[in-house]
Amino acid sequence: MEKTLGLGGVFFRAKDPAALALWYETHLGVAQVPQDYDTVPWMQQAGPTVFAPFAQDTDYFSRDSQQFMFNFRVRDLAAMVAQLEGAGIKVVVDPEPHPNGRFARLHDPEGNPVELWQPAS
């Protein structure tokens, strides 16, 4: 069976796409979409990716109307949290270490939940 190789992009609606793209680039290092075909887009590091539909009534995404949540792998959760908090962004670190790693939660300027994940070594 032929299978997909990974995510080729993530596309979603935003009230202010340019400002939100700049926020993700500035604070999380996700490069904006190139304006030409000669510029290389954001390149992910190889690693685990979870593709998980959730029940319609889940409260995991913060609000009932939320249909998605980003989860970004990070190398050093403490350093990333310090960087974000230094920029005035509220981050809630899950105090419980999980078998698969450590997690933190924040929201982008449009209220979308963003989860940070430092996989267990």
Image (cartoon, helix red, strand yellow):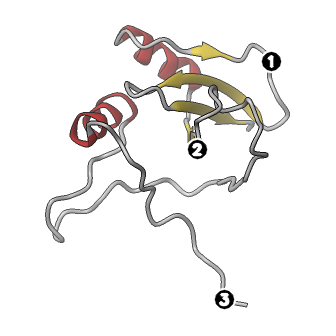
Q: Are marks 3 and 2 in contact (CB under 8 Å)?
A: no
Residue 99 percent coordinates (x, y)? 85, 34
Q: Nearer the viewer, mark 3 or mark 2?
A: 2
Q: CA distance from mark 3 to mark 2?
A: 26 Å
Q: Nearer the viewer, residue 98 or 57?
A: 57
Q: Are marks 1 and 3 in contact (CB under 8 Å)?
A: no
Element type where label 3 sits in the image: loop
Q: Nearer the viewer, residue 106 or 16?
A: 16
Element type where label 2 sits in the image: loop
Q: Are marks 1 and 2 in contact (CB under 8 Å)?
A: no
108 on left or right of 15: right
Query: Relative to 46, does residue 16 appear above or below in the rendering?
Result: above
Q: Nearer the viewer, residue 98 or 109?
A: 109
- List the single residue furthest toward the right: 99
100 on left or right of 86: right
Task: Tell me which amino acid carries mark 2.
Answer: Phe
Residue 10 percent coordinates (x, y)? 45, 56
Element type where label 1 sits in the image: loop
- Pointer 1: what residue? 96
Q: Residue at x 48, y 11 (%)?
A: 90
- Pointer 2: what residue? 68
Q: Residue at x 21, y 58 (%)?
A: 34
Q: Earlier in the sequence, mark 3 or mark 2?
A: 3
Which image quadrant for residue 23? top left
What label does residue 2 carry, if any? 3
Residue 41 percent coordinates (x, y)? 30, 59
Task: Tell me which amino acid carries mark 3.
Answer: Glu
Crowd tier of the residue under label 2, counting other residues whose Cα lies within 10 Å: few below 14, some 14–19, many 20 or above: some
What label does residue 119 carry, if any? none
